[in-house]
Image (cartoon, helix red, strand yellow):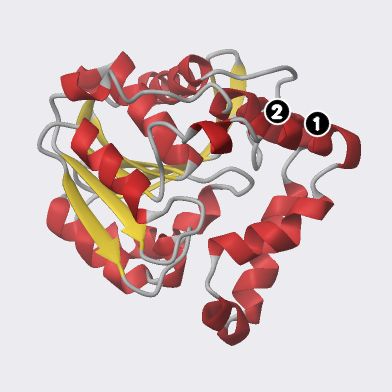
Amino acid sequence: MKIEANGINIHYEISGSGPVVMFAHSLGSDHSIWAAQKSALAGRHTVLAYDLRGHGKTTASPGAYTFDLLAADAIALLDALQIEKASFVGISLGGMIGQAVALAAPQRIDKLVLADTTCAYPPEAQAAWPERIRQIAASGLEPLVLPTLERWFTAPYRAAHPEVIERIGALIRATPVAGYLGCCHAIAQLDFSARLKTLPMPALVVVGDSDPGIPLPLAQALAVAISGAQLAVIPGAAHLANIEQADAFNQLLLNFL
């Protein structure tokens, strides 16, 4: 389904019944990565999964995006659907947006789940984003597909589940370059670390123990930055822990919610 919100058309899916849980996906994917969570939560929750600006079937507006803009998209979608309050689950880029939404409108967030994400990168990692933006502008997304899949899933999982790897690779390839670049500009400015201590809602930080993009110290720093946040480490998972270890991820999610 699509709805106009914050000046763009946002594609979303909503199903189930009960308290609303909103899901935000990673850079270069779409709402479909949450299929296992949708099934697990359907009996107890209303699941709202949407395509971020510039991804999937949501408008890919040109230019650099900011986290203020991406958070405003999520809040506008809640407004358009007349949802006053929801728990928010975000992975990677989606987790960064979750932090931005919680900071911008804490009264709208019941509980916050931040998976395989960070509130700030070390200087050397942050400095790499402008070069990444330059390379994508010059060569498109194809050169990123294989190294991204290698970061997102462990080698044993890739070998055992080629059909999943093919499907996720197709999502990366299908992402509009304008949308990918727009979100990269937002990530290049990421730093919520000093502000998160003000968040009032319960928070759960989840990370795969084999995530090369968000190593454990970054997840630990995020959990420390949010007063009272819980930290959970999922064994045998890389960056997309919600897919690679769906059962473990779902159990953590259900227990927390």
Please name the residue shown 42% across and 33% down the image: 96
In the image, which disc is placed on residue 189?
none
How far apart, in angstroms, are the residues tagged by discs 1 and 2?
6 Å
Q: Which of the 4 image quadrants contains residue 245?
A: bottom left
Indicate the amino acid at tag 1: Arg
Residue 215: % across, % down: 41, 54
> What kind of element bears circle 1?
helix
State the residue lying farthest toward the right. Answer: 138
Q: Residue furthest bottom?
A: 160
Q: Read off the residue under disc 1.
A: 134
Residue 121 in the figure: left or right of residue 66:
left
Report whether 129 appears left or right of 141: left
The answer to which quarter of the image holds residue 74 is top left
Q: Quadrant for the N terminus, please.
A: top right
Contact check, label 1 and label 2, Cβ < 8 Å = yes
**Residue carrying label 2:** 130
Image quarter for residue 253? bottom left
Q: Residue at x 16, y 49 (%)?
A: 257
Q: Position of residue 230 (x, y in %)?
A: 15, 47
* Residue nearest the viewer, comparing 9 with 232: 232
SS at badge 2: helix
Q: Amino acid at mark 2?
A: Pro
Residue 104 appears in view:
yes
Assess disc 1: are there few (<14), some (14-19) or many (≥20) residues with their C-alpha within 10 Å of its C-alpha.
few
118 up-or-down from 194: above or below: below
Image point 73% across, 17% down: which residue?
Answer: 63
Q: Position of residue 117 (x, y in %)?
A: 41, 44
Badge 2 density bin: few <14, some 14–19, many ≥20, Cα 10 Å: few
Residue 147, percent from left and from top: 69, 60
